[in-house]
Amino acid sequence: MWLGLCLFLFIYSFEFNQGIEIYKFGATAWPRAIILLMAIAALGQLYHHWKLGDQATSQIISAAVDDGAEEAAHEAHHEGLKWYASTLGLLIIPFAYMRVPDWITALVSAEGTSVHVIRIICAAILIGIFIYTMRRNITGAMLTLPLFFAAMLEDMGFYSLAPFFIIGVMFMFGERRAKPMVLIAALIFGLLMLLFVKILYVGLPVGNIHPFYDIGSWAVTILQ
Amino acid sequence: MDAFNNFVTGSISLFSDPLGILIFFGGVIGGMLFGAIPGVSMLTLAAILLPFTAHLSPVHGIMLFSVIYCTGVYGGAITAILFNIPGAPENAPTAFDGYPMTQKGQAGKAVGAAVMCSALGGVTSTIIMMAATAPIADWAISAFGPPEIFALVFFGLAVAASVGAKTFWKGWLSILIGLMVAVVGLDPVGGIERYDFDMPYLLAGIHFIPTILGFFAVSEIFVQAEKKVKGAYKAPKISIAFPTLGELIAHKFAIVRSIVIGFFCGILPGIGATLAAFMGYNEAVRWSKTPKEFGKGKLEGVISSETANNAATGAAMIPLLALGLPGGALTAMMVGVFQMHDMEPGPLVFINSGDLVWVVFAAMFYANVSILLIGWLETKTIINLLRIPFQFLAPMILLLATVGAYAVRGLTIDVIVMFLAGVVGFFLRRSGYSVAGIVLGLILGKIGEQTFAQAMQMLHFEWSGFFDRPIALGLLVVGVLTLMGSIYGEFFKKKPPTAETPVS
């Protein structure tokens, strides 16, 4: 995988292989040196794996080794191909939201409010797929949820999405009691709004499709 | 003696002025708070305040920024220790051992050590700064050009490769990923677009704040989520047992070493507190008799990192005030404050505005002392955040990170990059790669390439030019020896017996 990545990066470096008058190494020398070192390190890792398997290097300082990430993956049986395929499937959802509405818009030559409708319908369908799939892979869903939230942020805005995002994360972490979820979501959202919008005047995305844009603008007007 | 008299005069000027006192405490508390909020660092506060300093006197404006600098560097340690979220890049090494200490129920000890060592590093650095600004600045600025800074970066990376990953090769791969990410955007010499994949956003490069938030904070939430799925999640134990004086005295060599490293790094323009913290931590590992305990919650890790990054703050003022060279973003903003008042930082400041210099020096001294006083009180209250169940804390951390990433440039793509870095970090961590190595590569990659290009132009593209510069040569040789030592250990050193490979 690493060697494949090196090859891709090396081939892509020809895209910007231009000389610089005052610098004879040009724009490619530095990245290509890194690619070369990366290839050497990848071969070294391959050799290490062939010789010693998964054993840690003896003189290495184990800041990452013992942080529980590997152990947690092992205990949760999240190492099989099935789990990786399911997680990859879930991770495609946010990227689908970033691309599919644009393709449909171009395909049907939509304009104005119909573009907004297409984006809302796409979001609704993808949320449905996400909820249906997440039951079998909660960790994969946890990886996907923040990315999905970030992908929709530009369109739907922080003010409309954040409360649902908070509830979603709590649900992923095993909270099922509705009342605490709603109360805590309101508390976190309220505190963040107070600190960042009211006191620090941080401009957060309000969204750019109706009715989310109106909700965001209304929230900003109320707070500021 | 002159320095002491000037310091006393500066202290009297500072505390006889009610507005000065108000600005001083505002800076102390603001720096600590903003330093502790991930993403929204002391730089955010400084940027917000910059236009308002036009309405302040030059003394008040510069003093405010220097106080924010001292306390902001400390503030970032709190979230690094409690939640594995470094408030700023210079607090990243603090999380290596600080967060495992929290998980072991020693949060109080870690935060207490951060409070004491930040104060100690900062106070010592300020005292040295007051005593030796002129001669040290003269030496460092004349002796350290781009070749030396590049050699220092190389040495820092060579040492860092042995920290954090499961194998030597994974350590290097982690650093090289960071270096490669730093390549994205415009080339520093010719402005040529590299690896932008025709996306305008990537032209400006990948910003390190969303990346750091993703690799540290977000990936940590994902790891905890996985533990929760299996029911293996354990809430950290609460403890406000601060370190004893004896424990700190036992680490006196680590403290002194980190002060020297921090001060030295702080004095070099463009290097500053981040490399100081990483080098302070790395040297602690190298000098330790029990290096394998680092990363698992060793107090010395927190002590070394926090002493070094605060020791860099006083030193960073030396090139700024003595030669007008800013060492980092915050000191560059200070140049802006000077210019707003029709002043230029440099040697003339000592002659024309001696009062200003000594009030600022005194304020920095007291700001570091106040870390000790206010930090103790703040720690007692802030540790209670750990009592909140993780299912309620997780969304709060994720939303804080979202706001932090978005506030950097006002781009939602930064939020996407942050969460993507979180996903990548999650998979790399479970495979034994080092997220700290990636972040260090990312931060030092830009400095490294820029100084390498400047060095080669300066040396007329003759590699032998490095041999004529003893400091650069020395650092390169030590870096190469470190690298060779690691390679020797990987290929030729006998592996210790493990359960899987019993010795016959």
Image (tube, rainbow, N blue to C red):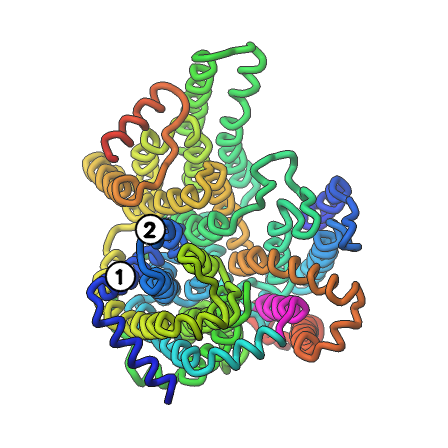
Is residue B158 or residue B307 the one in the foreground? B307
Q: Are marks 2 and 1 in contact (CB under 8 Å)?
A: no
Magenta run includes residue B148 = yes
Helix, strand or loop at label 2? It is helix
Disc 2: host chain: B
- Rendered position, A75 above or below A134: below
The residue tagged 2 is: B52
Magenta run includes residue A95 = no
Q: Which residues are magenta?
A: B143-162
**Quadrant of the frame with the C terminus of chain B:** bottom right
x and y percent of residue B285 in the render? Answer: 51, 75
Image point (34%, 35%), residue name: A165
**Quadrant of the frame with the N terminus of chain B:** bottom left
Secondary structure mostly seen in magenta is: helix
The reply, left or right, for residue B480 in relation to residue B336 is right
x and y percent of residue B362 in the render? Answer: 32, 74
Numbered badge on residue B252: none
N-terminal label among 2 and 1: 1
Image point (43%, 51%), residue name: B223
The amino acid type of the residue labelled 2 equals Phe
Disc 1: host chain: B
Please tell me in which quadrant of the rendered image residue B171 appears: bottom right
The amino acid type of the residue labelled 1 equals Ile
Is residue A58 or residue A4 the one in the foreground? A4
The reply, left or right, for residue A79 in relation to residue B37 is right
Neighbour class for label 2 at 10 Å: few (<14), some, many (≥20)? Answer: few
Is residue B359 or residue B232 the one in the foreground? B359
Helix, strand or loop at label 1? It is helix
x and y percent of residue B65 in the render? Answer: 37, 61
Numbered badge on residue B23: 1
